[in-house]
Amino acid sequence: MTNEDMQKLGKDGMDMAMTSLGAWTKNAQAIAVEVVDYSKKSVEGSAAAWEKLIGAKSLETAMEVQNQYLKSSYEDFVTEATKLGELYTDMAKEAYRPFESALAKARS
């Protein structure tokens, strides 16, 4: 292997690492934005439920408000967990993608 081949190999490796890091960073930012949005929505939902609970005129109304809040909170959590799972999966796929061609070449 010549010096030129070694330099190309090093450059190719660095390019793959930087591309992977870029995909990782982009997806990590998307995940952070998603978590912040979910947190904000959760706090707003909690405040709205608390206001309804305080304004309840009967125990039955208060129980209904609480049940609705718990149900919607659970559904929102499941939706968010699914969305975050997809974002993490996408992040792993995109970060791995630059290495796929190198692995295919190595296997040949």
Image: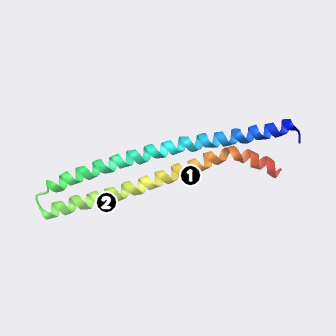
Q: Quadrant of residue 101?
A: top right
Q: Amino acid at mark 1?
A: Thr
- In this view, the mark in front (1 or 2): 1
Judge the density around disc 2: few (<14), some (14-19), many (≥20) Cα neighbours within 10 Å: few
Q: Residue furthest right?
A: 1
Residue 92: x and y in percent read 59, 50
Q: Which residue is mark 2?
A: 71
The one nearer the camera, 14 or 37, is: 14
Q: Amino acid at mark 2?
A: Lys
Q: Earlier in the sequence, mark 1 or mark 2?
A: 2
Judge the density around disc 1: few (<14), some (14-19), many (≥20) Cα neighbours within 10 Å: few
Q: Is label 1 in a helix, a strand or a loop?
A: helix
Q: Is residue 103 left or right of residue 83?
A: right
Q: Is residue 42 above or below residue 17?
A: below
Residue 79: x and y in percent read 42, 54
Q: Which residue is mark 1?
A: 89
Q: Which residue is pictured at 10% across the width and 58% down the height?
A: 57
Q: Is residue 60 left or right of residue 104?
A: left
Residue 91: x and y in percent read 57, 47
Q: Which residue is pictured at 52% across the width and 45% down the height?
A: 28
